[in-house]
Image (tube, rainbow, N blue to C red):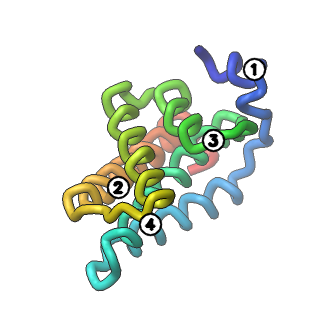
């Protein structure tokens, strides 16, 4: 499935590319990643901050391609479009989706988040943010 197919099905909508908007999201993602590394706060809050970095990075990837999510389940959609929007490997997308599911379980059941999951989320968030920045420099330098 392509991004254009997702547009046709109503899962995505067109969104004008705006460098200021993309830069603002990238700055927010970096702030959240910094917060995720603060060991004095709970594992759940660190995980949430790292997960927010992943979501903001995935949104930048879609927006740089001229789209925004327009459907329920937009977190899942943003993660699952990363192979199409920036060429992320399916294996990495599966890891990010597992972190999304872990976040849902924690948020909606109150289940605690363990240190290993928190560190994995922080690492994946950092890698994705770096991947997004590299992709922008290579494919959309006017937005970087």
Percent x, y of residue 64: 64, 40
Q: CA distance from mark 3 to mark 4?
A: 18 Å
Q: Earlier in the sequence, mark 2 or mark 1?
A: 1
Q: Earlier in the sequence, mark 3 or mark 4?
A: 4
Asked if one can make out residue 119 in the rendered structure from this viewpoint, the answer is: yes
Q: How many other residues sit within 10 Å of disc 4, few (<14), some (14-19) or many (≥20)?
A: many
Q: Nearer the viewer, mark 2 or mark 1?
A: 1
Q: CA distance from mark 3 to mark 2?
A: 21 Å
Q: CA distance from mark 2 to mark 4?
A: 11 Å
Residue located beneath label 3 in the image: 74
**Position of 36 relative to 93 (above/below):** below
Residue located beneath label 1 in the image: 9
In depth, the one of 141 and 26 nearer the eye is 26
Q: CA distance from mark 1 to mark 4?
A: 31 Å
Residue located beneath label 4 in the image: 49
Residue sticking out furthest to the front: 109
Q: Which residue is at a point 54% across and 59% down the rendered structure image?
A: 26
């Amino acid at each position: 499935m392509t991004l254009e197919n997702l547009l046709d099905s109503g899962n995505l909508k067109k969104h004008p590319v705006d460098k200021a908007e993309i830069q603002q999201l990238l700055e927010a993602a970096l702030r959240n990643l910094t917060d995720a590394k603060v060991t004095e706060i709970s594992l759940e809050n660190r995980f949430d901050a790292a997960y927010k970095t992943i979501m903001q990075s995935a949104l930048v990837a879609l927006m740089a391609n001229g789209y925004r999510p327009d459907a329920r389940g937009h977190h899942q959609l943003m993660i699952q479009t990363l192979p199409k929007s920036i060429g992320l490997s399916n294996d990495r997308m599966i890891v990010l989706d597992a972190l999304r599911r872990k976040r849902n379980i924690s948020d909606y059941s109150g289940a605690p988040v363990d240190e290993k999951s928190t560190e994995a989320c922080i690492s994946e968030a950092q890698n994705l943010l770096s991947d997004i920045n590299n992709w922008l420099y290579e494919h959309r330098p006017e937005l970087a």
